[in-house]
Amino acid sequence: MTGVSGEERRWRFADFDQIDGVPCPCGTAKRAFRGVAEFPGTLHITEICEDAKRHYHRTLTETYVFLECGADARMELDGEEVSVRPLQAIVIPPGVRHRAVGRMRVLIIVLPEFDPADEWFD
């Protein structure tokens, strides 16, 4: 898509309905904005499954924004369980072991850009 004078657009657009989901330790993630110089991270819509695996990242910071979840939804963070509900958010710095407990749909902001090699398991 180009601007009025044929210049390349400066803004970016993602349609998550058009992005294929990929397996991840939490369930299935749709990832957008990889390689966009103006945005130093990636944006994910993740469908969390019942058997999400505890993991951590050595360099990535993730911010979870809970879009949909059941009344019993929780996050396990370094062994502590925290109840969550829609429209709450949690920042998860590098090194924090984490997993979602229960089915949920989350928006995840990942900084810097997501790297699948930075998923670690104990």
Image: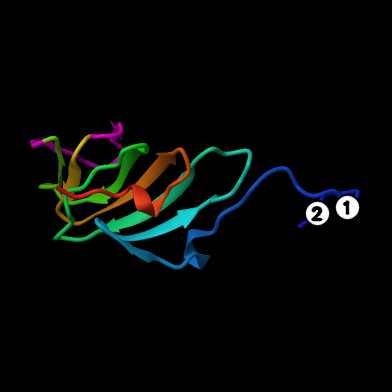
> Are the residues tagged 1 and 2 within 8 Å (C-beta)?
yes
Instruction: Give the residue type that dot 1 points to.
Output: Gly
Question: Which residue appears at 61% of the width and 51% of the height?
Answer: 13
- The residue lying toward the viewer, choosing from 33 and 14, is 33
Q: Is residue 69 above or below residue 77?
A: below
**Count of marks, rendered view:** 2
Question: Which residue appears at 56% of the width and 55% of the height?
Answer: 14
Q: Which mark is residue 2?
A: 2
Q: In the drawing, does residue 23 fall left or right of residue 6?
A: left
Question: Which residue appears at 14% of the width and 54% of the height?
Answer: 102
> Which residue position holds label 1?
6
Label 2: state its secondary structure: loop
Q: For residue 92: magenta?
A: yes
**Which region is colored magenta?**
79-95
Q: Which mark is residue 74?
A: none
Q: Position of residue 29 (x, y in %)?
A: 36, 59
- The residue lying toward the viewer, choosing from 3 and 57, is 57
Q: Determine crowd level at label 1: few under 14, some 14-19, many 20+ residues with C-alpha closer than 10 A.
A: few
Instruction: Give the residue type that dot 2 points to.
Output: Thr
Label 1: state its secondary structure: loop
Q: In the drawing, does residue 25 fall left or right of residue 71?
A: right
Q: Is residue 76 above or below residue 23?
A: above
Q: CA distance from mark 1 to mark 2?
A: 5 Å
Give the quarter of the image for residue 110: top left
Q: For residue 69: magenta?
A: no
Q: Determine crowd level at label 2: few under 14, some 14-19, many 20+ residues with C-alpha closer than 10 A.
A: few
Q: Is residue 77 above or below residue 49?
A: above
Q: In the drawing, does residue 8 fall left or right of residue 122?
A: right
Q: In the drawing, does residue 92 fall left or right of residue 122?
A: right
Q: Is residue 68 above or below residue 23?
A: above
Q: Position of residue 32 (x, y in %)?
A: 50, 53
